Amino acid sequence: MNNKMYDFGGFRLDEDQKCLWRDEELVSLTPKAIETLLVLVRNNGKVITKDALLDEVWANTFVEEATLAQNISTLRKTLAKYDENIEFITTIPRRGYRFVEDVTEISAEEEEVILEKHSVTHIVAEQRQIHDSQDDLENLRRSRPNSGRSAGSFLSTRIVAMISLAVICAGAIAYAAYFYISKGNDFYHAKFQKFRVGTLMSGANLQGGLVSGDGKYVAIVDRKNEGDAILLRQIEDGNMLEVLPKSNLLISGLTFSPDNSAIFYSAYQKEPSVQAKIAKLYRIPILGGAPREIITDIDSPVAITADNKKLAFVRNQLNEKKSALMIADIDGKNEKVLAIRPLLAGFSTFGLSWSPDGKLISTVIIEPNSEGPPARVGIINAETGEAKTLSEHSWMWVGRTIWLNDGSGIAAVAYGSSSPNLTDEVWFVSYPEGKARIVTNGLKGINGISLTDDLESIIATRVNRITTFYVSPFDDLDSPREIAKNVDGEAMLALGSEWSGNEKIVFGKIQNGNSDLWMMDADGKNEKQITSDKSADYAPRITNDGKHIFFLSNRSGNMNVWRVDSNGENPTRITTNGNVGAHSVSSVNGNIYYIAKAKDKAYAVLWVVDPNGAGARQITFKRTYGAKVSPDGKYIFCFYPDDKTDAEDFNNALKFTVLAADSGKVVKQFASLTSRNFPAVEWSHDSGSFLYLETDENTALWRQTIDDQAPAKLKEWTNGKIYQFALSKDGSKLFFEKGEEVNSIIQLQNVKAE
């Protein structure tokens, strides 16, 4: 076995180990950057087209040319750090790239290396053992008694064996042919092994792209502050029709009728409070008209049988702490409870689906007490209500499930526990085997899908965040300075940031498809990568002495708290709970605070542990989210239920709350949370107040002191959205990320195998 290495310009590239060395220093590069470099170096002096690079580095994976360009840029910057006078990679306009530095290939035989470590005596002894073994084998053959079989009987035995072998082979071929016809050619196996991607339309407010079964139309929710509208686009010619004008509704799910003549939609009245809202199901013709109310009290998009006779939907019963899977006639009459689960392990509110024969209903089954990812694709018997998991694979989150029209499987968008960029992918799960295969490996930012009946198209909403990093004097928020651009924002959430002292910022960033930790000066200069791992690292928190960084990572398969030295060395896992809450880590006075599931409960609470992961202790005993410990270590900000309510009461809105860090007792509670998302929150440097973002038509920064009841608005941005912010340690500077989300309705078209 050859272990190839390539020498060029003072570097050594190890093909077997997939690493790059500069003298004795290991050069930090992502795995995909290394693979890109290997292709270029192996073909040094030759022009490698962009398509060739994409096919070799990202085989069977969809990526855009921008990802390749980012990889090339990373390689150039990294190599230039060591020798800025050498141009290693040149761009050939309209063709591709060429590696122009001289390369020396080194090939070392591993067997020879092993022999060099042996002594001469050892080698002779090994040779003697080989010869002795051969002599013993020959003696054994000579001493074997005669079996009594003639040459003829031996020949007959050979003929029988050959016939038997032929029968076995014929059976294997027949089985393989049967498998190909019955399984290998079904939708699950045959469709979307390859596909093309096109954009139908883009806009900041577009959500919920849903394709009709015949593939002619896409229904879209146009989300505006004054209320949602439903648009209908003809795929072939691009004509647009407003089916439902802007209304005082928050639409939560669309479904086409099986004959594609109407759209069913679930919607809440748009109100300032998120507490105790009741949604209704409506039906409207696709060419517009008066909507008709079908059902009151629905918590999911509706699923419709192929014969257009039955509905299925989820109804959460908050007072009883139950989740019910309901079925009804197509007109909403004859409602019936089919199955019940505990509320915190309830049925997916993102959407169900009937099997083509109407005997099963697909859903997501949550196992909140699982030590691993809690979500699996499941099926419900439409007659008995019996529920069981289908998929062997599990995920952190699974969205709407959709049966493939030939019944061979179920499609869903899901977020895996080992996602390197904290984003969703499209998966198929086979029925009845439960095998999962990823479809959109590398197509990032997917948020919701729908399928045509022939599975020739998948329509999806794709989200990309284009943002800019700014630093502003805290006493003059109208004078920010742009310090960096961030155009690879396909993660589902902000990746976190914190100041190291007053002059450096540690932040999460996605590059080449991986979320890692980076550091830069307050002016954006001297950007340096701290962590480099195939999993996702984000949400950094720095110790007071600046020597260590605590962060969230899914390196172990679940989201846990990890620690790394400030130079990126010595990564150490701290927590073992798994599924630690996003942006919930604080490092104060030698303790690490984080959100994770309560013992013997299905909801999340606040925990504290020492810097080495020992002595984990639960602090709160009610639902707790978004916890941040004050700089002096005395207080904890969090979103917390009313102090007077029972821990199991989920019918009340969460409140802005300050707890005592030592006991977890409520110090003070403020207004109730009015949005469906948790706003970004940070403590002031003196621990006397907390700052938070509120987004409605615009984004505003507010300050709430512990002593005063009314918050004060510090700044309102009239354009763009603020995704995260961080205060310097002395409170003099504010770092923030500001930008826009571009939502695109995209079409994935199946490419038939040649």
Image (cartoon, grey):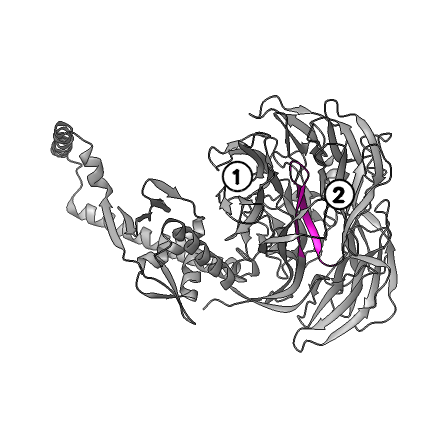
Local secondary structure at mark 1:
loop
Q: Is residue 190 left or right of residue 147?
A: right
Q: Which of 135 and 146 is in front in this view?
A: 135
Q: Which of 466 and 642 is in front in this view?
A: 466
Q: Residue at x 66, y 56 (%)?
A: 739
Q: In which quarter of the image is the C terminus?
A: bottom left
Residue position for label 2: 692
Q: Is residue 679 shown to the viewer in this render?
A: yes
Query: What residue span does the magenta drawing correspond to?
Result: 719-739
User: To which quarter of the image does residue 703 belong?
Assistant: top right
Q: Is residue 596 left or right of residue 393?
A: right
Alpha carbons under labels 1 and 2: distance apart: 30 Å
Q: Which of 576 and 586 is in front in this view?
A: 586
Residue position for label 1: 555
Q: Main secondary structure of the magenta part?
A: strand
User: To which quarter of the image does residue 452 belong?
Assistant: bottom right
Against 220, residue 490 (above or below) is above
Q: What residue type is labelled 2?
A: Tyr
Against 283, residue 26 (above or below) is above
Q: Nearer the viewer, residue 754 or 479?
A: 479
Local secondary structure at mark 2:
strand
Q: Which residue is drawn at 42% across and 71% down?
A: 93
Q: In this view, does 530 lie to the left or right of 15?
A: right
Q: Which amino acid does label 1 sit on?
A: Arg
Give the crowd class for mark 1: few <14, some 14-19, many >=20 residues within 10 Å.
some
Q: Which residue is drawn at 60% across and 24% down?
A: 610
Looking at the image, tell me whether mark 1 or mark 2 is earlier in sequence order: 1
Coordinates of residue 158 in the picture (x, y in percent): 24, 49
Coordinates of residue 487 in the picture (x, y in percent): 58, 57
Give the crowd class for mark 2: few <14, some 14-19, many >=20 residues within 10 Å.
some
Coordinates of residue 170 in the picture (x, y in percent): 38, 57
Q: Is 609 part of what is drawn in magenta?
A: no
